[in-house]
Image: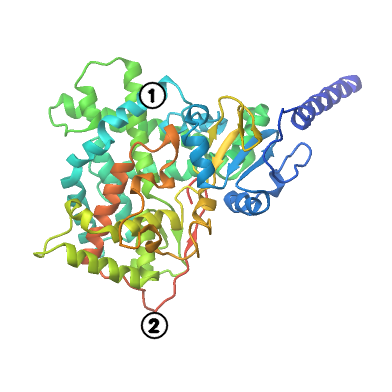
Amino acid sequence: MFSTHILASGISCIVALVVVARLTRKRAYPLPLPPGPPPLPFLGNALQLDTKRPWLTYTAWGKTYGKIIHSSIFGIDLIIINSETVARELLDKRSGNYSTRPIIRTNELAGVDFNTVLLPYGETLRRHRKIFHQVLRAEVSVSYYEMYSRHANELVVNLLDGIGDPQHQTETYTASLIMAVTYGYHAHGHEDPFLSRARELFDIGNRIVSPEKAAMFTAFPFLEKLPFWCFGGAFSLIGRCRELAQQLLNEPFNEVKAQMANGIASCSLVADFLSQAHDEADEDTMKAVALTGYLVGMDTVCRYLSSPDPDLMSRTAQTASTLQTFLLATVLYPDVQARARAEIDQAVKHDRMPCLDDRASMPYLDAILREVLRWYPVAPLGIPHATSNDDVYDGYFIPKGAMVMVNQWALSRDEDIFPDASRFDPNRHLTVDGKLKDPFVNHFAFGHGRRTCPGRWFAENSLWTAAAAILAVLRIDHAKDSNGNKIEVKPEFTTGVAM
């Protein structure tokens, strides 16, 4: 028995030493890596990160080490890009080398690796994007104009009537739009079961899939053998995440199938697909594309926001949309709200609601929405890319297999491009004669290179239509306390892959 214990202890020590040696050995590169903070043996820079807001750490490092930095976590190379110029040079101009995704085991463990956004570059991704291109490209978006207006008008009526709070209404608006396109489904209010499950999946996944958290599973594969409750927090919900993913992949898809069998299905992406002959593998692809469209549709226009004011905007404690950030900006910057409303009054006559045909006459509203995306980026670190091959940039070596992350927070706070960056100022996106500087869909929030969001036209049209309708009808102001005094608002954002 004594010798058995000695043998077991000896094996454990050997395994530990091998792991440490693998993670701490120096690799020889032909050129220096990008500059970055000195790593600790074994841990790399893991203990130096703000684990809840790593983008703030990377931004601070950028002020010391430059626009492109190198860090490591448990032996995994991370390349952090803190400059839009560098992002365009690498991810756009060299997209062939920067278009894949790292293999992040937590995605697979949580059952969300079906998501188009997370797929490595290859044939499966090309099939997904081809389907998205068919229904979300710029030319097709024209056919959705009436749908945008109908849902936006419904949103305004519900906000005006005080039905639910703005968080719920904006969630329902964005969910109904993308679900109408993908499944021909109209969400039945905030408590709609599909919307509730999707929100739960989004919330759990948001806290699990960050590269920093996933690195330990990549470095220590044996951790997968342990029950996830050992890790506490969101990791204990990985099983629930897998269950939700399977429900959301299958249930709405099968509902469309049943509707088609009964001749009552609405026109949708899934219905069009099912009207043709396909095998089971194609069905799995379609399920993944449809659910991705919904989840990314939420993610593009959604984030979680809290305010110390419990009564702001009909007692909203949290909101989940860029539209809500737009509402927040109109409260904090009433001059912006007034100018936007004056633009609408000038462009839209005869007591009608603004529509996308009026958009060319309303550049300031476009500038506001660009500033909303810049002011508090939806996904501060985006989704990590990975290098397919070794590369060299500005004399620095970027190794094959490195995770490459664009720090959108640093891009949004680049004082050389956005002076007084913490201030909400739509004018920064306009020329001196009042025209937009760049197309909305080129915003860094939509990603880079071959991984640019294929639904960006759908997203911008739905955001613009809702914002225009809100400004045309509503006057947005601070809530008042019991004495009639204005309640000050301080925005506070929660954390995750999206804020």
- Per the image, label 1 sits on a secondary structure element best described as helix
Q: Residues within 10 Å of mark 2 (few under 14, many from 20)?
A: few
Q: Which mark is residue 443?
A: none
Q: Looking at this view, is 276 or 59 the one in front?
A: 59
Q: Quadrant of residue 159?
A: bottom left
Above or below: residue 304 compared with residue 224: below
Q: Looking at the image, which residue is at 60% across and 28% down?
A: 401
Residue 161 appears in the rendering: no
Q: Looking at the image, which residue is at 69% across and 36% down?
A: 33
Q: Which mark is residue 485?
A: 2
Q: Amino acid at mark 1?
A: Arg
Q: Quadrant of residue 232?
A: top right
Q: Residues within 10 Å of mark 1 (few under 14, many from 20)?
A: few
Above or below: residue 194 compared with residue 242: below
- Per the image, label 2 sits on a secondary structure element best described as loop
Q: Is residue 461 left or right of residue 60?
A: left
Give the mark toward the camera: 1 or 2: 1
Q: Position of residue 111 (x, y in %)?
A: 47, 31
Residue 489 appears in the rendering: yes
Q: Is residue 48 left or right of residue 346?
A: right
Residue designated by label 1: 126
Q: Looking at this view, is 163 or 1 the one in front?
A: 163
Q: Looking at the image, which residue is at 38% across and 38% down?
A: 453
Above or below: residue 220 compared with residue 382: above
